Amino acid sequence: MDVVDVVGADVAPVLEPLPELTPAGTRLLDAASELFYARGVRAVGVDLIAEAAGTTKKTLYDRFGSKDALVALYLLRRAHRWRRHLLTRVEAAGPAPADRVLAAFDAVEDWMGAQERGCAFVNAYAEVGGTDHPAVPVVRAEKAWMRRFFVDLAGDGRLGAQLHLLHEGAMVTMTAGGDRDAPRSAREAARALLAAADRPAVLTGPPAGSAPHLPA
Amino acid sequence: MDVVDVVGADVAPVLEPLPELTPAGTRLLDAASELFYARGVRAVGVDLIAEAAGTTKKTLYDRFGSKDALVALYLLRRAHRWRRHLLTRVEAAGPAPADRVLAAFDAVEDWMGAQERGCAFVNAYAEVGGTDHPAVPVVRAEKAWMRRFFVDLAGDGRLGAQLHLLHEGAMVTMTAGGDRDAPRSAREAARALLAAADRPAVLTGPPAGSAPHLPA
DNA sequence: AGGTAACCACACCGGTCGGTATACTGCGCA
DNA sequence: TGCGCAGTATACCGACCGGTGTGGTTACCT
């Protein structure tokens, strides 16, 4: 089975495929990706990118048209790579849904690794959110894909959304919060939610003394 | 009881008190706060801030010394206001710990309200993280305070950290993910975690077939 | 031989960046 | 009376911003 089919073939095409690049174009995108991720997209100028890639601004604009398009492509490629990593890890975890969910949280931990700049999509949205920047729909698509990934994995919309919250919380807490244990903490919480979901509804109601809530 | 004592008097002083400001200084900080939050700190220039405040760059630098210091002060004041909002809501929820936890998630929902730019601290960290910008320790302190807030509220380090993850995940998913239901989803997940924590440990262990994990 | 895509070197554009300098007005206070 | 602080107004600084234009050099394809 192709790795991209793990969560349903109709999800992957949300993002268009990556275009082929010339040698200098590849070097530019590689250099831009490193710089954008490490320092933020606004903090990095096109002059610096061209210099780091060993080429010129002219080539950059010939290949990508604008800095904004380069930013969007940087995120697009990163999304592809992250999904490949995630789906590979989940696939290796075996067929049991619970194991696959926990593997998704392990995937976060070793994807982030020593990096301390967190989620590239959240960071980019922090800089360009609320504008018509072409990166905004890429961010939106990535988050929608991740949510759907967890929903399909959990086989339940409510539980999947909750697992997605833990995933996002782990990444942001690990970096902005400086908490290295966040992915493991999220994994534990995910296990607790999975266990709770296996129980009859009457046992998962609100604790005594709390206010009534929306129907289950 | 003063509102700031709800989670322990030793936590509040983590952030120094806000300095008093002259009228023009207040206008500058107000204008800067709106602009920084809406567009990001790097996207907003000091000329624009001075103009929006109806004053001049000269006054800005006389009062705050640098743009970086103004950014840090913007976050510092926002932290104070958020905590006041949060603690007021939690206090109004009554004495039951579970109710207080759920009230914390309600506080997120009506704090964010119609805003679609998410957590100011996460956004700022996305722009200046990895540098020696004076805003970085302010972000770190805020996230540490929030974690401790949930730990104290839950009376348990492990559970508190997990609730904190849900809190952070809700904010980022609501904005970068565009999911308006995220705070309510986080509230449901929090209730499930609270309920699971009330059960004996033998019932909350890993489901059959999953790998062994760290001791409880 | 001619065409073309890819690339490089370099100069240039208007605009904005954070930050500074100078000169002046109004006001409270000793 | 006079000092000092808060504020206004404006001009200025070097550096960098995203983006364009010109001209020339390869290498491959027909």
Image (spheres, coloured by chain):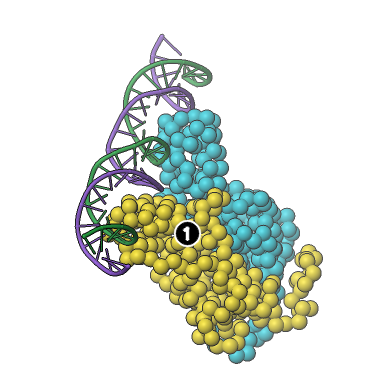
Chain colours: A cyan, B yellow, C purple, D green
Query: What percent of the width, then of the height, locates residue D13?
Result: 34, 37
Quadrant where the image shows the C terminus of chain A:
bottom right
Is B178 positioned to the left or the right of A166 in the image? left
Is B197 positioned to the left or the right of D30 in the image? right
Question: Pointer 1 indicates a residue of which chain?
Answer: B
Task: Report the residue marked by disc 1.
Answer: B72
On the question of residue B174 being in view, the answer is: no
| Pick the front one: D6 or A89 | D6
Q: In which quarter of the image is residue C15?
A: top left
Query: What amino acid does circle 1 point to?
Result: Ala
Instruction: Report the residue at 30% width, 54% height from top.
Output: B56
Query: What percent of the width, then of the height, locates residue D19?
Result: 36, 37
Query: What percent of the width, then of the height, locates residue C27?
Result: 24, 67
Query: What percent of the width, then of the height, locates residue A164?
Result: 59, 65
Is D10 positioned to the left or the right of D13 in the image? left
| Pick the front one: B100 or B77 | B77
Instruction: Report the residue at 37% width, 51% height from top.
Output: B45
| Pick the front one: D29 or D15 | D15
The relative height of residue A53 versus residue A195 in the rendered view (above or below) is: above
